[in-house]
């Protein structure tokens, strides 16, 4: 709306053109759903009751997984942000209410020893390979970084599992729009993914959060 009644020009119009309304970033469709923390589990084959389709989140620690989960469901404190000591080998499950989101432990801790790495590989291999309710995996990668050795190991496990994968490229706000698009194309090529399997996201600017929510709904059956 523009102010009326003052500042007319010679033509009788307003001095200021009306503002160009910028569309708000669409909110995540998951914001409208009630969400409940179900629990933390060490067993990758834990049975969640009731049995419902689930979407898993996997990524290197510090990639922005907790922040993205919180942005997706619109509850700032739901997933704990970063590396809670002693919780790094547990799956965290959230129910919303016709499907689950499962937060897998972050990988690639610099300090992780051989045994911890082998334990992680076993957990993820069993989870991806044997979980009957798993509908798809959101794989988080920092848009600015080339895939690490650990990322490539996870890529191998994802390919072997044959599960549907969507790569969420995080922290897109740290690059210009053009640079982020170039990175998305390059990362898709480097990871053997189709361009439509890659979603630029930012929990800060909210870019791509709504789209990611829609993809999750489609993967679990298109309904909540
Ligand atoms: P996690 O270890 O994968 O769960 O990562 P966190 O969610 O704890 O995030 C790690 C760090 O990245 C924190 O300092 C966050 O504030 C920051 N971060 C997360 N998402 C974004 C984002 O979209 N943009 C920016 N600029 N920083 C982010």
Image: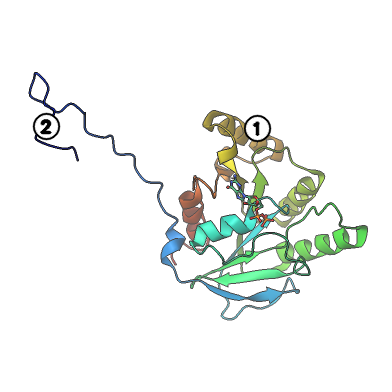
Q: Residue 184 at x, y = what percent? A: 60, 36
> Label 2: which residue?
6
Task: State the image quarter where residue 27 is shown.
Answer: bottom left
Residue 184 placement, left or right of 28? right
Q: Residue 194 at x, y = what percent? A: 60, 40
Q: Is residue 43 above or below residue 141?
A: below
Task: Classify the position of the N terminus by image quarter.
Answer: top left
Q: How busy is the neighbourhood of tag 2: few (under 14 within 10 Å), some, or many (20 plus)?
A: few
Q: Is residue 30 above or below residue 166?
A: below
User: Which secondary structure lies at badge 1?
Assistant: helix
Q: How busy is the neighbourhood of tag 1: few (under 14 within 10 Å), some, or many (20 plus)?
A: some
Tell me what residue is drawn at x 9 percent, y 35 percent.
5
Q: Residue furthest right?
A: 114
Q: Residue furthest top?
A: 10
Rendering colour mode: rainbow
Which label number is shown at residue 34? none
Residue 12 placement, left or right of 202? left
Front residue of 8/132: it is 8
Tell me what residue is drawn at x 48 percent, y 60 percent.
217
> Label 1: which residue?
186
Tell me what residue is drawn at x 66 percent, y 78 percent.
47
Tell me if I can see residue 134 in this picture: yes
């Amino acid at each position: 709306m523009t102010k009326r009644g003052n500042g007319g020009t010679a033509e009788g119009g307003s001095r200021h053109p009306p503002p160009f309304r910028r569309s708000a970033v669409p909110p995540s469709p998951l914001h409208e759903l009630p969400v409940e923390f179900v629990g933390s589990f060490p067993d990758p084959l834990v049975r969640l009751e009731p049995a419902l389709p689930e979407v898993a989140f996997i990524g290197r620690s510090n990639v922005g997984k907790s922040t993205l989960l919180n942005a997706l469901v619109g509850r700032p404190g739901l997933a704990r942000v970063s590396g809670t000591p002693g919780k790094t080998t547990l799956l965290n499950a959230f129910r919303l209410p016709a499907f689950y989101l499962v937060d897998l432990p972050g990988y690639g801790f610099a300090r992780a020893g051989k045994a911890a790495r082998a334990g992680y590989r076993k957990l993820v291999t069993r989870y991806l390979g044997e979980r009957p309710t798993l509908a798809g995996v959101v794989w988080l990668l920092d848009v600015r970084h080339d895939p690490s050795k650990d990322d490539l190991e996870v890529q191998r496990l994802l390919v072997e599992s044959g599960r549907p994968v969507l790569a969420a490229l995080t922290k897109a706000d740290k690059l210009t729009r053009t640079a982020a698009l170039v990175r998305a194309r390059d990362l898709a090529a480097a990871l053997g993914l189709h361009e439509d399997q890659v979603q630029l996201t930012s929990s800060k600017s909210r870019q791509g959060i709504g789209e990611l929510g829609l993809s999750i709904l489609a993967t679990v059956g298109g309904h909540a």
